Image: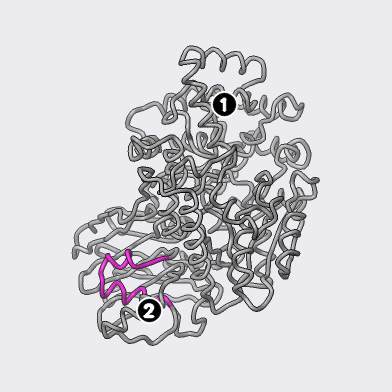
Amino acid sequence: MCGILGISSVDSIVDKSRIKLMRDTMPYRGPNSNGIWFDNEEKIGLAHLRLSILDPTPAGHQPREEASHNCVISYNGEVYNYLEIRTDLEAKGYTFETGADTEVVLKAYIEYGVDCLQHFNGMFAIAIWDGNKQELFLARDRLGIKPLYYLQNEKEFIFASETKAILKGLEKKPALNTQLIDSYMSFGYIPGENTLHQGIKRLMPGHYAILKNNAGKSNELTITQYWDLQFDNSQDKGFDYYVDGSKKLLDSAIDLRLRSDVPLGIFLSGGIDSSAVVGLLADRVEEPLKTFSIGYDFGKGFDETPYAQIIADKFKTDHHEIKITPAQFKEFIPEYISLMDEPVTEAAAISLFFVAKLAKEKVTVALSGEGSDEIFAGYDLYQYMNVLDKYRAVVGQTGSNFFAGIANKVFGESHKVSKYLTMATLPIEKRYKGMSTYPDHQKEALYTAEFKAEIEQSDQITSRDYTEGLFEKTKGEDTLSKMLYFDTKTWLVDDLLIKADRMSMAASLELRVPFLDYRLVEFAATIPSKHKIKKGEGKYPLKKMMEGILPNDIIYRKKMGFPTPLKLMFQNELRGYAENLLLSEETILHQFFKKSRIKQLIVEHNNDKFDHHKTLWQLVVLEEWLRKNTNH
């Protein structure tokens, strides 16, 4: 787990001091060592920050050069099956100088070219300069666990693990893609390849890029998708087959993720996902597992640590926990905005930072349960959406519109009943926006007339084409498969995984996610939807798999998932902060949103008339981000 970056210039020498400044914006990604490499003409430079996991000796230093093949690598992440790949390469005559996976990744590229990606099982962002081809090869893992951003103009191509590194290398901050604020207000993050910074893009999960260096001419960039998730419910091999197959693959995924030359622990929430990792791992280790939990001092509704303690006691782990206060949450918000790099309304990320910081005192690698809900259908929302489909079939379009209108008048637009009945007025392709859903009428009530007119222009950059295209790819699949594919390509990568990467890296901790082993993800996509949700229970294969290993009270309890008491905090500790931030003369959001509407949301929330905490947090995150990232 590291940080990478680089610059490829068309016709000028890359400034070494500039690339060092870029590298130094994210020192937490590589506290053990760092390095820079330049080609002979100094028109391409690669840099690296290292968090040592495999072969922590100086032999694992990067960028790593294979002079005999004129190739250099700067690489972030882990290829867990590197030992098997190494054995295959040794059979082909390759020799190895280190015990690190970096050397294996580079030599796999030398042997297989871009097809090396088909051999890798892991999380990674890879940059390889191929001097013989005069090409820069960039690749990102299948699910997007590791980030990779880039910017290209007529003079140069810049890439990095975080946007802040790219921004540091520019003479001035790019203009905003202000139209994407609308996407942010719809999702709570921005899905797709574009970011709020004009010109800065994400290399998408399961894609690689090749930058061809055309001596003295503009660099030519081509991007290719090498992996996609395919759903196939055409065969039903029986529920037990899918339970057994999932368990074998999860066991294998955990085994691979135990490969480490440094201490390892587990984030334990007390929910089924992280508890399953502990339960399946406990028998594989000689020493007690180190587990880490976090909670808020706001009562049972915001504290999962008692459930975590049940698992810790059952499996005799070396358990550690921390409680954080609203004051700590509030104080950390500016740092959260800076570390996240992009505006993401994931309040649980702050909890994740504190538990990662706690874990770092004992370990360098941690496992967590991310991804289980997206592959096994664990969210209640999936069941609600299936119910809405049946409701639409009964009442029709006219009935849907009528009952939604009544609910909005009686309960208010922010009420859960109103939200779901309003959703029911639309087909799944139009109403489903993933796990972080903000109804259109709520955001549009905030927009100024000028901003609304701007985002309605047809030539604007939006996320709409991307998200609509996701439903096109699952045309013909059932409703649940459509939602799971959508969430895997949006919510999972642009919310949960960006949170996991940024907050763990901020503590210089490597986070591994066994549920997102691509073999398990692919297998889960073949499980018929009727087996994923049964008897009102989501994640049914996982729950049945863990019976007899975990207590039933843990398996079948209601999901919480790092709960954050934002509703209460906006009425108390965050009240004055939010008012000052969102209603001052300096508030940047007023360029896009009506001040009167923001004030109305705050007043209604404080008076307990409606619960607006999600929208208020969304506005706080965006305002803080704009203050850090624009020339205001």
Is residue 108 a member of the stretch shown in magenta? yes
Compared to residue 338, the image places residue 575 above or below, namely above
Q: Are marks 2 and 1 in contact (CB under 8 Å)?
A: no
Where does label 2 land, which residue? 103
Relative horizontal placement of residue 501, taking residue 150 as reference (left or right): right
Instruction: Classify mark 2: residues with Cα within 10 Å, few (<14), some (14-19) or many (20+).
Output: many
Q: Secondary structure at mark 1?
A: helix
Query: Majority secondary structure of the magenta segment?
Result: helix
Determine whether the residue tagged by mark 2 lies in a helix, strand or loop.
helix
Taking the spot 46% from the left edge, 69% from the top edge, the residue there is 78
Q: Position of residue 337 (x, y in %)?
A: 59, 50
Q: Is residue 563 above or below residue 123?
A: above
Q: Residue at x 50, y 73 (%)?
A: 50
* Residue 216, percent from left and from top: 19, 63
**Residue 233: x, y in percent?**
38, 43
Residue at the disc numbered 1: 420
How did the renderer colour the structure? one colour
**Residue 168 appearing in the image:** no
Q: Which segment is the magenta one?
A: 101-121
Q: Which one is in front, 607 or 24? A: 607
* Residue type indicated by callout 2: Glu
